[in-house]
Amino acid sequence: MNKQSRGQFLKTLGLSSKALMAFYCLGAVSACSKEDETVTPTTGGTDNTATGITGTTSGASVDYTIDLKNASYSKLTTAGEFVVIGDTLVANAGGTYIAVSKTCTHQGTTLAYRKAEGDIWCSNHGSEFKTDGSVEKSPATTALKTYKATFDGAANTLKIN
């Protein structure tokens, strides 16, 4: 898969320099990282097995399988670890796998799983969600979309749908 800088990626979306600057100034795009940071564009479609993911990771039809033997996702075998894949946040919540939408329902910030609290947290305004997606603490008022997470111990895979 091709890697490109954040600016190159945004330019492929057809955004002009002025539009990009407006996004940076408004905080819509994080400028807190190195300029040479690379992002891997994905289409939300089927990835190849070399990435450790097969299936659709974004959009209305999320349905994919994670190979937990793949180095990128093997940390999910440890309680308290999580990853963001496509439109989802997948976590090992103490031996039970959960999968929810990755964005806070308040203002769209990418969420994180907190091991010590056993919940999902938004760093932007402090919203908290239970692992079933329900709101635990505002300002968010709408629950997260949840997905079924099915672990296959024999194959060491995790199916999300």
Image (tube, rainbow, N blue to C red):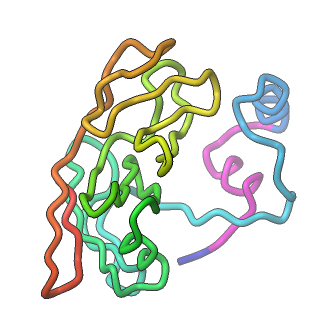
Is 77 colored magenta in this rendering? no
Residue at position x 35%, y 72% in the image: 47
- Above or below residue 53? Residue 7 is above
- Above or below residue 65? Residue 60 is above
Using residue 140 as the reference point, say whether residue 61 is left or right of it. left
Using residue 124 as the reference point, say whether residue 50 is left or right of it. left
Q: Position of residue 102 (x, y in %)?
A: 43, 42
Kindly indicate the quadrant of the structure image that contains residue 157.
bottom left
Using residue 19 as the reference point, say whether residue 2 is left or right of it. left
Q: Nearer the viewer, residue 140 or 22?
A: 140
Residue at position x 14%, y 63% in the image: 150
Q: Position of residue 147 (x, y in %)?
A: 21, 46
Residues rendered magenta in the picture: 3-16
Q: Position of residue 56 (x, y in %)?
A: 27, 59
Is 5 colored magenta in this rendering? yes
Q: Nearer the viewer, residue 127 or 33?
A: 127
Residue at position x 77%, y 64% in the image: 37
Using residue 123 as the reference point, say whether residue 102 is left or right of it. left
- Above or below residue 138? Residue 147 is below
**Number of numbered labels in the structure image:** 0
Kindly indicate the quadrant of the structure image that contains residue 136.
top left
Residue at position x 76%, y 28% in the image: 27
Q: Nearer the viewer, residue 122 or 48?
A: 122
